[in-house]
Amino acid sequence: MKNKLKTASMRPSPLASTVTIVGLLIFLIFGIFLMSDAPDEPAIFIFRIIWIFACIGGIIYSIRNLSTYSKEQKNKIPPTAGDVIELVSEDETAGDFETRLRKLEFLKKDGLITEEEYQIKRKEIMNEKW
C-alpha cells in the first residue's frame, strides 16, 4: 500500500489572536506616527508602506480567526492550545495489515487490551481480504 500523508491544520487560540491584535495595533501606531519623522527617502517610504500593510493584514487575519470561535469554544480552549484537525481519507481508515497488527500488539503490550481481546481482533484482521 502507498503511504498516505496526513494533513493537519492549526490556527491560533482566541487568546493568541487577541494578543496579536493588540501587538499589531501598537506596531501600526509606531509605523504611522513614529516613522513619520524618518527622512523621506524612497526606501524608507516603501518600508513604511510594507510595515503598515503587514500590520493591517495581521490584524484582519486575527479578527477573522477570533470571529470563527463560538463562545463555548473560547471557554473550553486553554490559552496555549490550537485546533488540530486531521484529514484522513477513506482508504486510510482501513490501514494496511502490518500497521494495524503492530498497533494491536502495542495495545496488548501496554495492557490496554486483554490477551483474549487481542486474539479476537487479530483473527478479524487476518480474515480480511489482503
Image (cartoon, rainbow, N blue to C red):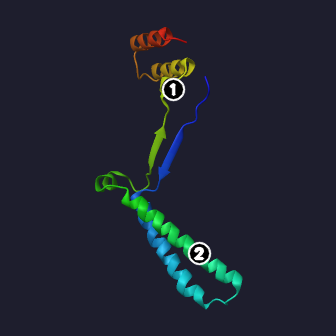
Assess disc 1: are there few (<14), some (14-19) or many (≥20) residues with their C-alpha within 10 Å of its C-alpha.
few
Assess disc 2: are there few (<14), some (14-19) or many (≥20) residues with their C-alpha within 10 Å of its C-alpha.
some
The x and y percentages for residue 35 are 59, 85
Eyeballing the image, is 12 above or below 31?
above
Eyeballing the image, is 31 above or below 101?
below
Q: Nearer the viewer, residue 50 or 29?
A: 50
Residue 122's disc number: none
The residue carrying mark 1 is 91
Q: Secondary structure at mark 1?
A: helix
Give the residue type at disc 1. Asp
Looking at the image, tell me whether mark 2 or mark 1 is earlier in sequence order.
2
Give the residue type at disc 2. Trp
Quarter of the image with the N terminus is: top right
Eyeballing the image, is 7 above or below 43?
above
The x and y percentages for residue 51 are 59, 75
Q: Nearer the viewer, residue 115 or 87?
A: 87
The x and y percentages for residue 47 are 65, 78
